[in-house]
Amino acid sequence: MLACDVKNFVVFTASEINGFDRKYITVKPAKAIRGNVLLCYENKAFFAKPGEQVPADHTNRWESLQIAQTFVGLGYEVDVIGETNEHFVPARNYSFFVGNRINFDRIAESLNQDCVKILHIDTAHWLFHNTGEHQRLLALQQRRKCTLRTRRSLQPNMAIENADYATILGNEFTISTYQYGNKPLYRVPISAPVQYPWPENKDFDASRRHFLWFGSGGFVHKGLDLVLEAFAEMPDYHLTVCGPIEKETDFKKAYHEELYKTNNIHTVGWIDVDSQQFKNISRRCIALIYPSCSEGQSGGVVTCLHAGLIPIISYESGVDVDGFGVILRSCSIDTIKNSVRMISSLTGNELQSRARKAWEYSRANHTRERFAEEYRKSISAILARLSHKERMVEETRSHFSQQTTPFSGTGI
């Protein structure tokens, strides 16, 4: 038993030390160093092999690289650590600290006092986020008489309270959950790992009754339960489900009938967005339906916009779709059914027009180039604001020194 314990300890320790949580890398500018930046965010892409592509499974892989590159381009040396690195302790002074909610509080307390702390917001506030998921799970319990586990709960944090500034992925909904903190917020659009050409010769009349649910884990959080129940009551409309179903065994068990034994529901499971299979599915479907209860800005929604799908989404999905999509007034089963029927009833020309607008909107607003541009603008605006504050302080000191007459009397 002792030998087994020692072996497990050695294996665990080696795995932990060699894991991305412990990895650390410094990215240096080619020119003179202006200062140091600590970036605590997704770090896997920084250790990719030469020629290896950045993984397309999440937008934050590339976005973290770009955040670092933005500061390097401004002349800063950037130390990069993983967002879940609980062991890192700052050993030098930093001009800026950039991180998301994970570890932000702990690291912020250890920084030099003049370090400017920038929170990179990629979810709605944890109180809203967790409350939304619990409400969905409770509602499911009442409908289906079963309890499923939470999957997307966020750890409580005081990140916005400890930040000086914040960049934020999302729409006005996402912003509203942080405004109480009274910190300057700079909106940045989420990027997309893959762009697709416009689907020429798509048969919009043939696709009008085919819909897609596409998302990652946390199926109740993202409304898959509601969508399945809605389509189970609409046998004339088809639903394709793309997500890691096998990873949530309790959900799979609770919805086994809908997922695998309902003729108009087709469960694919996890899918690569860069695959021909995904392209074929998006060509066959007319719209994405995604009634999430809370997001920062959904990368899955943006991916489907790039694929030319009409969005039927919740306001809390964090993506603006005015003029071409449908924002669900509520995420009730009846509202979902009515929205599906409404989209399906449109003419072929109207369907094509909405799909084209969705595709054009995504290419204009949600690309890696646009993320880089808007993030650079945000950091430049923060730098300008800091420079203005410094000038105001200097002017105040100068004015005070000119107005003060040195004391020359005799003390008592």
Image (cartoon, grey):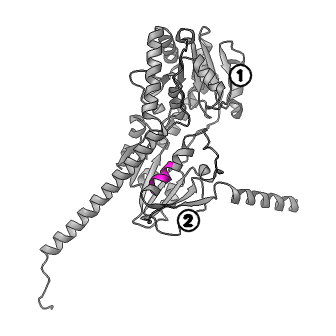
List x then y, in percent, for residue 95: 42, 63
List x then y, in percent, for residue 97: 46, 58
Residue type (three-letter) at the residue carrying disc 2 = Val
Verify whether residue 70 appears in magenta.
yes
Helix, strand or loop status at disc 2: loop
Q: Is residue 189 left or right of residue 153?
A: left
Q: Label for residue 89? A: 2
Q: Label for residue 113? A: none
Q: Residues within 10 Å of mark 2 (few under 14, many from 20)?
A: few
Look at 42% across and 46% down and name the residue there: 375
- Circle 2 or circle 1, nearest the eye: 2
Q: Label for residue 256? A: 1
Upstream in sequence: badge 2 or badge 1: 2
Relative vertical location of residue 95 with respect to residue 352 in this rendering, above or below? below
Relative vertical location of residue 218 with respect to residue 16 in this rendering, above or below? above
Q: Which residues are magenta?
A: 66-71
Look at 51% across and 18% down and name the residue there: 336
List x then y, in percent, for residue 222: 56, 30
Q: Is residue 393 left or right of residue 316?
A: left
Helix, strand or loop status at disc 1: helix
The chief SS type of the magenta part is: helix
List x then y, in percent, for residue 20: 65, 54
Verify whether residue 237 appears in magenta.
no
Q: Residues within 10 Å of mark 1 (few under 14, many from 20)?
A: few
Relative vertical location of residue 260 with respect to residue 189 in this rendering, above or below? above
